[in-house]
Amino acid sequence: MAQPTAAASGQFAIGGDLTVNRLGFGALWVAGKDVWGEAEDRPAALDLLREAAKLGVNLIDTADSYGPHTSEQAIHDALAPYPKGLVVATKGGYARPAPYAWIPLGRPEYLIQSAKLSARRLGVKTLDLWQLHRVDPRVPIGEQFDAIATLIREGVVRHAGLSEVGIEEIEAAQKHFPVATVQNLYNVANRHSEAVLDWCEAHGVGFMPWYPLGQGSVLSNETLQRVAAKYDSSPTQLALAWLLRRSPVMLPIPGTSRIAHLRENVAAAAIQLADEDFEALSAISEGRARRR
């Protein structure tokens, strides 16, 4: 059987004009251990990114805090000049003074500098999609959103999004700039952002679930394993297939450091869940499916 490509996941137009295959790739692990420094095997990390592009993945998510900076640089070194239609989405708004340190930093001048330096590392004049990694509670939220509006007005950023926000924050941001995407924690077992996803679907805003696969008890869930066996697929693939079925604005960005796992993830794009199986998986988060 031929390897499916990400095109099988369907398409979504970010901001109404950037059409991507809905199954993307998260470049967190293109950085080093603990998301710090270079990847231990950098040539392998570059090969991984090239393989993603060959598999039809044309939405790659990263952040200036991954490394910091090393994930963005790896994407440039692996893929520039970029294939036509490739969207590299990056994020800013975290300071990384040390491993394990993730400090929200939303001062306007810092956000503007971060975006401009991301563009430089990625080798582009304009970032297709830049997302505020976290809202900084120590800085007035309007000042952070004004900085993003400035980036769009100056042509540094084409479309902008937010990460780990609620509906109230999204609607506040909309008064400053059009919100193109929201990136919140979401997977088959953790659906605390259900209301945000529903809002995004109603307003045509892309929803990029981070940590889309969960781990441990999620992937060993009895229902997930039973349904996976029915499709001759892995629990990981079924978790992705469920996400893609859940909403047409869903843009999963699973990450990995292994080409074999990347191919397995992309193959999930071709799985068409039957209604009864979608409902069975949907019950996992609600506690109705028995766990091992």
Image: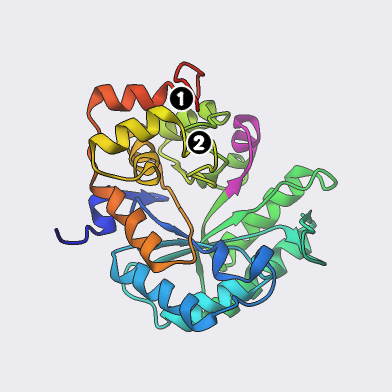
Q: Which SS class for mark 2?
A: loop
| Residue 143: % across, % down | 76, 49
Are dots 1 and 2 in contact, CB under 8 Å?
yes
Label 1, residues with CA under 10 Å away: few <14, some 14-19, many ≥20: many
Q: At label 1, which amino acid type do we have?
A: Ile
Total marks shown come to: 2
| Residue 112: % across, % down | 70, 65
Instruction: Depth check: give the residue in front, 205 or 69.
Output: 69
* Quarter of the figure with residue 91: bottom right
Identify the residue position indicated by label 1 in the image.
284
Q: Which region of the structure is painted magenta?
A: 162-172
* Quarter of the figure with residue 67: bottom right
**Residue drawn at (46%, 32%) of the image:** 221
Identify the residue position indicated by label 2 in the image.
218
Q: Is residue 17 above or below residue 204?
A: below
| Residue 216: % across, % down | 55, 41
**Residue drawn at (33%, 41%) of the image:** 241
Inspect this view and state whether residue 169 appears: yes
| CA distance for labels 1 and 2 | 9 Å
| Residue 94: % across, % down | 73, 58
Q: Which mark is residue 100?
A: none
**Residue drawn at (60%, 34%) of the image:** 171
